[in-house]
Image (cartoon, rainbow, N blue to C red):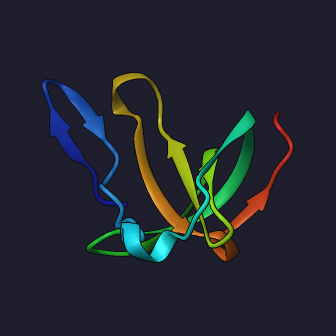
Amino acid sequence: MMARRRRDRWLPPAAFSVPADARGEPVLEVRPPAPVRAWLQTDQQQMRVNATAIWATPDAVLVEWGFGQAKEAAWVWRSAVRHRREA
């Protein structure tokens, strides 16, 4: 996995998001945020990460992954997300 460096911290690669007009409506907050495994697409690869689902539509889920200042978020297709148990 290629990462970028910012101020002596490694950041995960940025993932592509599903376009706003393709996500669908309504957009609902996931309460409580759900632990998931999600497939992400970057400009260099596809990768599966442990993430947290925070918003959802019938077609897409906004997932967040990483830690602290290195957190990233992206909208992915709902079929790219699976629930997981927290460790």
Above or below residue 32? Residue 62 is: below
User: In the image, what residue occupies the spot 26% across and 73% down?
Assistant: 43
User: In the image, what residue occupies the spot 34% across and 67% down?
Assistant: 16
Locate residue 55 relative to residue 72 in the image: left or right. Answer: right
Q: Position of residue 23 (x, y in %)?
A: 50, 70
User: In the image, what residue occupies the spot 34% across and 47% down?
Assistant: 12
Q: Quadrant of the N terminus?
A: bottom left
Locate residue 76 relative to residue 17 in the image: left or right. Answer: right
* Residue at the right extreme, as displayed: 85
Locate residue 8 relative to residue 61 in the image: left or right. Answer: left
Front in this rendered view, residue 36 or 58: 58
Q: Quadrant of residue 86?
A: top right
Q: Quadrant of the C terminus?
A: top right
Q: Position of residue 38 (x, y in %)?
A: 62, 61
Front in this rendered view, residue 47 or 25: 25
User: In the image, what residue occupies the spot 86% across and 43% down?
Assistant: 85
Q: Position of residue 58 (x, y in %)?
A: 68, 68
